[in-house]
Amino acid sequence: MPFYIYAGIERFAPDSGKFAVDVLEDAGVAITPGKDFGANQAERYVRFAYTRSMSDLQEGVRRLGKFLSSPLKNASPRRQPRAGNA
């Protein structure tokens, strides 16, 4: 039975490696860039493993949600808020 999710991130960032580092540094959640799992548009994907306790997973989802809903300094243009939405 799989214990991971391979998710597209193109809505949030163009580079899965940089995105994974940003998530780790800013949200404290470790994810793996898609480039570690193949070459087919790997920069557009990351892998989430769910091998932790349910409470850890819930905390990770909370942190990830907060990260994705707030713009970052030096973020890619896709992560920047639109005018009037800041």
Image: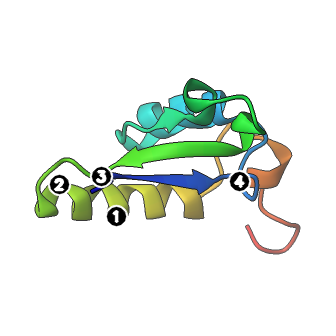
Q: Which residue is mark 3?
A: 3
- Residue for badge 2: 56
Circles 2 and 1: CB distance less than 8 Å? no
76 left or right, relative to 6: right
Could one spot residue 75 in this view of the protein? no
* Sequence-first disc among 3 and 1: 3
Q: Is residue 21 above or below residue 53?
A: above
Residue designated by label 1: 62
Instruction: Indicate which label's residue lies in the foreground, 2 or 3.
Output: 3
Q: Quadrant of residue 36?
A: top right
Label 4 amino acid? Phe
**In this orientation, which residue lies closer to the viewer: 56 or 33?**
33
Q: Position of residue 62 (x, y in %)?
A: 34, 64
Mark 2, secondary structure of its residue: helix
Front disc: 2 or 1: 2
Residue named by callout 4 = 12
Position of the N terminus, as image quadrant, is: bottom left
Q: CA distance from mark 2 to mark 1?
A: 10 Å
The CA distance from mark 4 to mark 3 is: 23 Å
Q: Position of residue 81 (x, y in %)?
A: 77, 62
